[in-house]
Image (cartoon, grey):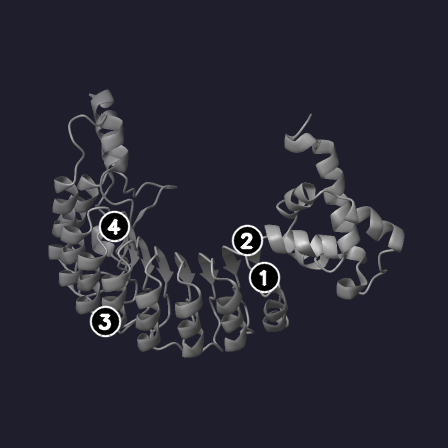
Amino acid sequence: MAMQGGLRIEDLDSFKKLMVFSAGLDGGVSGGVEMSGEMSAQWKDIPMELLLRIVTLVDDQTIIRASWVCSGWRDAICLGLTRLCLSWCNNDMNNLVLSLVPKCTNLRTLILRQDKAQLEDNAVEAIANFCHDLQELDLSKSFKLTDRSLYALAHGCPNLTKLNISGCSAFSDTALAYLASFCKKLKSINLCGCVRTATDKALQSIAYNCKDLQILNLGWCENVGDVGVTSLTYGCPNLRALDLCGCVLITDESVIALANGCPHLKSLGLYYCQNITDRAMYSLAQSCVRNKHGVWQSIKSRYEDNGLVNLNISQCTALTPHAVQAVCDSSPALHTCPGRHSLIKSGCLNLTSVHCACAVQAHRAASTTAH
């Protein structure tokens, strides 16, 4: 079977296996046997197109090892690598980043999630200096990073659309507000656990600058209040998913503002937001009714697409069954039935009577059959 450019799939599979094998032999990385001059010469004859294709098929560890095999591979990797995940690196990730990013300037996605903190500000500054087209960056659990990193990203990576700094406890709200003023293309931000970073001040900057924001995780950001959430509803009308779990300061005013200002909202997390009352639920229900699709939409589309898809109200003990049922009735995609739980109400013993639309229909069908 032929491939574009005259390359065959059999060739690609063979070269992929050889890349994995040769990367394992590379003495500079694994301590194994160095490539012979003859083998190295053979690799230099591989077309650049084929090398670029192989890079997209092997795992990230193999790519890193392969970059040390010969100059041809290194050039191909530097040219073709647009996505890199180093989360597998349990030791010395900081130096690995410092050695790689000056060569891999075409990166669009970089995943640096860690189990133990390794990254330091100089690595993030290197990313900002060399990876100007970066769009997605995951720095979660980087406890050693300071505001220097956010300031560097603000100036060096203005094209960021997705940023995960969850668990980065040292960042200030001032630094996040500054980053938002430069990275205006952000569509997804994860600030879970960033208590010091996620404040009303920071959210106001995000709302003012990041008009295309669709996903925001503020889980366990205890300093977030109604002022910050309300500002999001004015500045980010395309918001699709908002996690406010553990944001103990917010009240009904935040949810009412979301219901009125974010018509595309599909996922809302309110776990342990114990100031939330029935007023918030009724506002969500009314919003779903207002936003129903027009008469030209099929019944199936209206049933599947309208309203909330996920809602977490666990430990919101002030809510009553009637109010929550109103939300459930207005959002057919919310489910309480086994295997499809998207309305999560753990710890709310008074809400056991709330059922999703499909469960009610099944009950009615069973009753009709019995009669």
Which numbered tag is attached to residue 83?
Answer: 2
**Residue 177, relative to residue 338: is it above or below?**
below
Q: Marks 4 and 1, how far apart in space?
A: 32 Å
Residue assigned mark 4: 238
Dot 1 corresponds to which residue? 86
Seen from the viewer's position, the closer of residues 278 and 38 is 38
What type is the residue that disc 2 sits on? Arg
Instruction: Give the number of marks.
Output: 4
Q: Distance between the residues labelled 1 and 3?
A: 33 Å
**Mark 3, residue position:** 200
| Numbered disc 4: secondary structure | loop
Q: Residues within 10 Å of mark 3 (few under 14, many from 20)?
A: many
Residue at the (46%, 66%) spot, across then down = 140
On the rendered image, what quadrant is the N terminus found in? top right
Front disc: 2 or 3: 2
N-terminal-most mark, 1 or 3 = 1
Q: Label 1 amino acid?
A: Leu
If you read the primary sequence from the N terminus, does the residue marked by circle 2 or circle 3 appear first? 2
Query: How far across and down, in percent of the image, does residue 145 sit?
Result: 47, 76
In terms of secondary structure, where does tag 3 sit? helix
Amino acid at the residue labelled 4:
Asn
At which x and y percent is residue 85?
Answer: 56, 58
- The reply, left or right, for residue 345 in relation to residue 19 is left
Graded by Cα atoms within 10 Å as few (under 14), some (14 to 19) or many (20 or more), the crowding at tag 2 reads: some
